[in-house]
């Protein structure tokens, strides 16, 4: 979309992009800034005409915000989280898997099925395309993506050309995960290992592939402070869901710390934290709701009693 045709809402979304993304993605300010700057350049028409709005390789450990940033970007740019198209590239590790991306030619098995990539973007042309674990894709699959990154177009097996000019393409990789975790554990800056990590990336991907990307973005491991901030974000979601049923949730700081400590596994990022909150808090709340121990108009307070999480309900349930 030429900059002159951007609506006022589009302009405001672009100018406020960092703030919106940082509200969802914790501890990755450098990554957020790099993505926001590149996306603004793309939407302002400063990139090569016809190319995607932005193209990125996100490198870092699991569970540190790579997927969350892609989801947040879909919501911030296109107004809806369902504008995210996600493909697991470990499923495209064989040469023949190219046909799954663009469809099989006429006369071949599966020729009546559309390509998974081309069909998804044809249906949702304004979207964030997330290609997980890109290092596991077959080289022929990467060759197909080269044309998308360079010209913003891809022709499927039926001869139909799909336009990627209004997409943001994000590829993720766990390359260098151990080094980035070590940096977080020692309190050092990602900049201290940037060059050796980029050398590792260059050793895995061909230059013509990397040269077509707007940015290789490094994601740091999460420390205890970042995990506590993520805990608060996740608990805010639980609080919102209860509020929709007119039920309050108040968490003592000790309860937040209790959950954060039990969810802290640096090598897995924030993913264990989601499981801990689900097991220790949300499942118990579900049982209380179903048993009638917690209902509309009441508030549940979470505190720590010894080594366990204690849930106490305040207020009387509505009569009748």
Image (cartoon, helix red, strand yellow):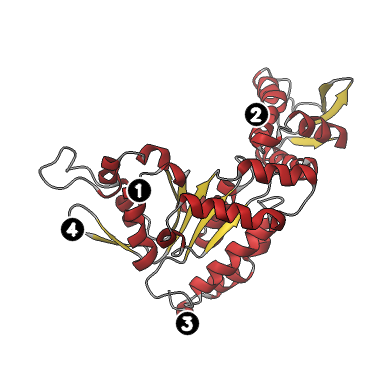
Residue 263 is situated, as x and y percent measured from the top left of the image, at 72, 31
* Tag 4 near tag 2, CB within 8 Å: no
Q: How far apart are marks 3 and 1 (CA)?
A: 39 Å
Q: How far apart are marks 3 and 2 (CA)?
A: 46 Å
> Mark 2 or mark 1, which is nearer the start of the sequence?
1
* Tag 1 near tag 2, CB within 8 Å: no
Residue linked to disc 3? 4
Pick the residue in front: 222 or 190.
Answer: 190
> Mark 1 or mark 3, which is nearer the start of the sequence?
3
> Mark 2 or mark 3, which is nearer the start of the sequence?
3
- Please rate how many residues cluster around mark 2, counting C-alpha atoms within 10 Å: few if below 14, some from 14 to 19, many from 20: some
- Please rate how many residues cluster around mark 4, counting C-alpha atoms within 10 Å: few if below 14, some from 14 to 19, many from 20: few
Q: Is residue 112 visible?
A: yes
Front of the two marks 3 and 1: 1
Q: How far apart are marks 1 and 2 (CA)?
A: 35 Å
Q: Distance between the residues labelled 3 and 4?
A: 33 Å
Give the mark count.
4
Residue lying at 46% horizontally and 74% vertically, measured from the top left? 47
Residue linked to disc 4? 159
Q: Can residue 320 be seen in this view?
A: no
Q: What element carries label 4?
A: loop
Residue lying at 37% horizontally and 71% vertically, measured from the top left? 50
> Mark 2 or mark 4, which is nearer the start of the sequence?
4
Residue linked to disc 2? 275
> Mark 4 or mark 3, which is nearer the start of the sequence?
3
Above-or-below relation of 19 to 10: above
Which residue is farthest left?
A: 107
Say the numbered circle drawn on residue 139.
Answer: 1
């Amino acid at each position: 979309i030429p900059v002159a045709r951007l609506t006022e809402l589009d302009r405001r979304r672009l100018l406020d992009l960092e703030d919106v993304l940082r509200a969802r993605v914790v501890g990755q300010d450098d990554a957020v800034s790099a993505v926001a700057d590149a996306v603004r350049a793309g939407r302002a028409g400063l990139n090569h005409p016809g190319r995607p709005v932005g193209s990125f390789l996100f490198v870092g450990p699991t569970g540190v915000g790579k997927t969350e940033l892609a989801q947040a970007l879909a919501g911030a740019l296109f107004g809806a989280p369902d504008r995210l198209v996600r493909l697991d590239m470990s499923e495209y590790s064989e040469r023949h898997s190219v046909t799954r991306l663009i469809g099989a030619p006429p006369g071949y098995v599966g020729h009546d099925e559309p390509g998974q990539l081309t069909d998804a973007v044809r249906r949702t042309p304004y979207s964030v395309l997330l290609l997980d674990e890109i290092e596991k894709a077959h080289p022929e699959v990467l060759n197909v993506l080269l044309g998308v990154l360079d010209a913003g177009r891809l022709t499927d097996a039926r001869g139909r050309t799909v336009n990627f000019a209004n997409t943001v393409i994000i590829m993720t990789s766990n390359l260098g995960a151990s080094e980035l975790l070590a940096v977080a554990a020692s309190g050092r800056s990602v900049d201290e290992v940037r060059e050796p990590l980029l050398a590792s990336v260059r050793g895995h991907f061909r230059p013509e592939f990397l040269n077509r990307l707007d940015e290789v973005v490094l994601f740091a491991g999460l420390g205890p402070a970042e995990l506590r901030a993520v805990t608060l974000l996740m608990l805010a979601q639980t609080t919102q869901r209860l509020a929709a049923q007119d039920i309050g949730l108040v968490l003592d700081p000790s309860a937040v710390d209790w959950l954060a400590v039990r969810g802290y596994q640096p090598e897995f990022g924030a993913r264990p934290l989601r499981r801990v909150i689900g097991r220790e808090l949300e499942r118990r709340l579900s049982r209380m709701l179903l048993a009638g121990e917690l209902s509309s108009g009441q508030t549940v307070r979470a505190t720590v009693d010894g080594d366990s999480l204690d849930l106490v309900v305040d207020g009387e349930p509505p009569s009748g």
